[in-house]
Image (tube, grey):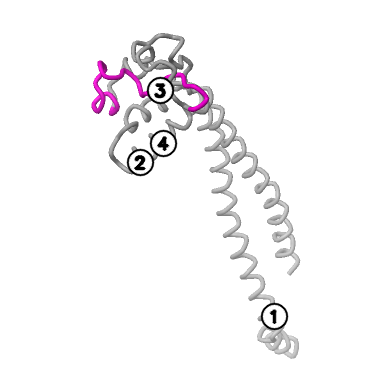
Amino acid sequence: MASAAAAEAEKGSPVAVGLLVVGNIIILYLVLMLIVYIFECASCITSYTHRDYMVSSPSLITKQMLTFYSANTDQGQELTRLWDRVMIEQECCGTSGPMDWVNFTSTFREATPEVVFPWPPLCCRRTGNFIPLNKEGCRLGHMDYLFTKGCFEHIGHAIDSYTWGISWFGFAILMWTLPVMLIAMYFYTTL
């Protein structure tokens, strides 16, 4: 009877209550960390698998370019500035080449008829001062005055680089989180 009374008194002691609180906090931590761990695994896998989707085919990039280049929306203006910068810096035109602008319907084509300019003027080769070498020759499609290389190689490389970085960073977080969770589980079992 005395041992039962001592056990009952010990249950209400501050040490036992403290251990219960610490145990509950550790369980809460482990559950939350497990949720974060699962989402981190999903993001690593998603970034790695979607890298191949984005880089393997230029059709998605082409569709976005044709839809938003020269559009009068915020997204269109931002994408136009991006494409202009890429075409000037990389000396390229369109996704696969200048014929992207001719072969497909685009927002640019609606704003600029083909007889005026079949592709954006920034597809024209330029001097060191960014003045077109021969605007009429570029408009007619003369190879000496027009960038014939597509921009997809540059864009694909950028996407590939960024997704590799995201995947490896996520993997590093996973490798750091796993031992922390295992130590917390061990600590919980020793309470």
Q: What residue sits right under mark 4 in the picture?
A: 81
Q: Estimate how packed mark 4 is, as few (under 14), some (14 to 19) or many (20 or more) residues with alpha carbons within 10 Å.
A: some
- Which residue is found at the position 40% from the left and 27% from the top? 60
- Compare marks 2 and 3 and give the one earlier in the sequence: 3
- Which residue is found at the position 55% from the left and 54% from the top? 35
Instruction: Decide which of 157, 101 is in the foreground and name it.
Output: 101
Query: From the image, which quarter does the C terminus lie in?
Result: bottom right
Q: Give the CA distance from mark 4 to mark 3.
A: 20 Å
Query: From the image, which quarter does the N terminus lie in?
Result: bottom right
Q: Estimate how packed mark 1 is, as few (under 14), some (14 to 19) or many (20 or more) residues with alpha carbons within 10 Å.
A: few
Instruction: Decide which of 11, 182 is in the foreground and name it.
Output: 182
Q: Estimate how packed mark 3 is, as few (under 14), some (14 to 19) or many (20 or more) residues with alpha carbons within 10 Å.
A: some
Instruction: Residue 2: give x, y in percent of width and height.
Output: 74, 90
Q: Give the CA distance from mark 4 to mark 2.
A: 10 Å
Q: Give the CA distance from mark 4 to mark 1.
A: 65 Å
- Compare marks 4 and 1 and give the one earlier in the sequence: 1
Judged by depth in the image, the label closer to the viewer, 1 or 2, is: 2
- Compare marks 1 and 2 and give the one earlier in the sequence: 1
Q: What residue sits right under mark 3 in the picture?
A: 59
Q: Quadrant of residue 122?
A: top left
Q: What residue sits right under mark 1 in the picture?
A: 16
